[in-house]
Image (spheres, rainbow, N blue to C red):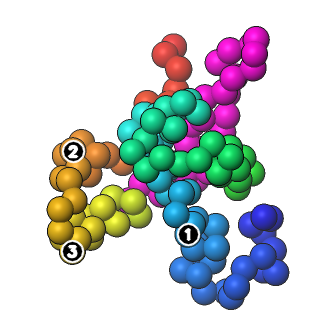
Amino acid sequence: MNSETDENYRSRCPLASALDLLGDKWTLVIVRDMIVDKRRFGDFQSSPEGIPTNILASRLRRLEKLGIVERRVYQEKPVRYEYFLTRKGAELLPVIQQLVVWACRHIPGRWTPAARFLAATPDDLLNADRPPS
């Protein structure tokens, strides 16, 4: 999906447009996992939601195409990748934090997120992704 053209969206409404990009049942779960330091395909598969491998691969490709994540080689033979949030992806953090807060208030039986998750900023995520100098 080319995020620059209006024909790829249902309307010009910002909310509807954001949901066109991120509103399926898996995309924000993958971003959530990246926020809590999951980087590799197997890490994402170990999440309790049980995302099927074909959907996970598809969503990671889509997130990369949209500029929300970037992938980096961590092994040459066979080639394997780690995934990191870009600035654009890290800026989803406050949205996800607010959805978590809302769910904890209004959906009984949800677990309480760690205080450091709720206190994190997009810059915290980006600084954590930089390799040590």
Which stretch is magenta? 67-94
Crowdedness near tag 2: few (<14), some (14–19) or many (≥20) residues, C-alpha within 10 Å: few
Q: Which residue is labeled 3 in the image? A: 106
| Residue type marked 2 | Ala
Crowdedness near tag 3: few (<14), some (14–19) or many (≥20) residues, C-alpha within 10 Å: few
Front one among 49 and 7: 49
| Residue type marked 3 | His
Q: Which residue is labeled 2 in the image? A: 114
Crowdedness near tag 1: few (<14), some (14–19) or many (≥20) residues, C-alpha within 10 Å: few
Give the alpha-carbon distance from disc 2 to disc 1, as whole Å.
24 Å
Q: Classify 12 as above or below 27.
A: below
Look at the numbered disc 3 and give the secondary structure of its residue.
Answer: helix
Residue 81 position within the rendered picture, expressed as x and y whole percent measured from the top left:
66, 27
* Of labels 3 and 2, the one closer to you: 3
Q: Is residue 76 magenta?
A: yes
Residue 108 position within the rendered picture, expressed as x and y whole percent measured from the top left:
17, 68
Residue 79 position within the rendered picture, expressed as x and y whole percent measured from the top left:
75, 20
Q: Residue at x 70, y 85 (%)?
A: 10
Q: Is residue 44 visible?
A: yes
Determine whether, in the image, residue 95 is placed left or right of residue 51: left
Q: Which residue is labeled 1 in the image? A: 23
